[in-house]
Image: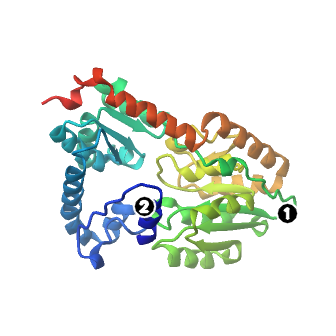
Amino acid sequence: MKATFDDSAATGIRIHAVRYAPRAWRRLAQESGGIVTGLRRAPWYVLLLPGLLFGLFWRCLLRTGDTDLIHANWAVCGAVAGIIGRLRRKPVVTTLRGSDVTRATRSWLDRMILGLAVRNSRIVICVSEAMAEQLRTQFPSRTADIHACLNGADESFFQINRAVSDDAGLRVLAVGNLIPLKGFDVLIEAVARAHHREQMHACIVGGGPEREALLALAASRGVSSCFTFAGTVPATDMPKRISEADVFVLSSRSEGRPNVVVEALAGGLPVISTDLEGVQGMVKNGDTGWLVAVDDPDALAAALDQAVTDRAELHRRGARARAAARIQIGTWVDTARCYEALFQTALAADRRGHPSCAE
């Protein structure tokens, strides 16, 4: 964490850490999978929540006196920032990342948090158009204030020269925290069921608490030799990883709009993904990749088998993936321009009568 602070300081960005517990206890938001996964793994972490929320509130309250605008990421931070925005008479912009919106469909507490965030924000940004449309339906009085602003990819991904391999082996790349939500167990089972599994090798990038269980599963299914668990790697390594793969697989059970899929498409990798709302707008079944049902190892195995046996189609889908990403997704520069325009909208003088500022 110190290295991150030092790097940010060099760019002129000031980071203020929220010290919500003694250092040895700060595990709530620091482990793989974030707060929700942490609470499932260790329910006693719930005792740390009041300290974290108060710490966020107090730190934000102290730092917003001389700011023009508050930008919050995720619904819970938007709810906290929304309260402070009213107290400080500052406009709030909240970005929703996907899982916070999905959880709100299943939990009354998450619905309440999402409602606070949306109603107290002048602008709500969603990372996909499908998510934005869902929110507009849920909050019809705020339709004009809900916008989609897509995460882009670094230009370096568009410049990747992929080492296309025409030999019999299919190089599979999968990336994510090793937690149940990511569905790596389904990928292992799919490879075990694939007709051409001896021609597949999957590299799984990421760390987390499920590593040993996944290794054991691969061994029990007789496919240990088909997998490499690379652990956590620097973000700067991702272009190289993509350049050395033939196909990207996302086997998640739930996602917002995964940046790693954006990067894979920009890098010219066809994507095999579970059929999730956050992915549907990026991966087109039969065009830039394959969409398969959640928790369906047979469907995933069939897609992998096709990728092995029809290399010409695999290469075509990869070329179309990059072209579509360039047009429909763009780079982080495009994303920054979108945010800048929405920040200006939030600051506009004619928005003083906005509902989020009502007493």
Q: Residue at x 24, y 51 (%)?
A: 63
Residue 97 in sight from this viewpoint: yes
Badge 1 marks a residue whose secondary structure is: loop
Q: Is residue 311 above or below residue 237?
A: above
Q: Residue at x 45, y 74 (%)?
A: 209
Circle 2: is it few (<14), some (14-19), or many (20+) Cα within 10 Å? few
Badge 2 marks a residue whose secondary structure is: helix
- Give the amino acid type for the residue marked by disc 2 in the picture: Ala
- Residue, far right: 167
Residue 110 is situated, as x and y percent measured from the top left of the image, at 28, 48
Residue 9: give its label. 2
Q: Quadrant of residue 50?
A: bottom left
The quadrant in which the N terminus is found is bottom left
Specify the color scheme. rainbow
Residue 56: give its label. none
Residue 273 in sight from this viewpoint: no
| Disc with the residue nearer the chain's start (1 vs 2) | 2
Q: Residue at x 61, y 73 (%)?
A: 229
Please give the residue where the numbered disc 1 appears in the rendered image. 168
Q: In 3D space, how far apart are the residues under numbered discs 1 and 2 (Cα atoms)? A: 48 Å
- Give the amino acid type for the residue marked by disc 1 in the picture: Ala
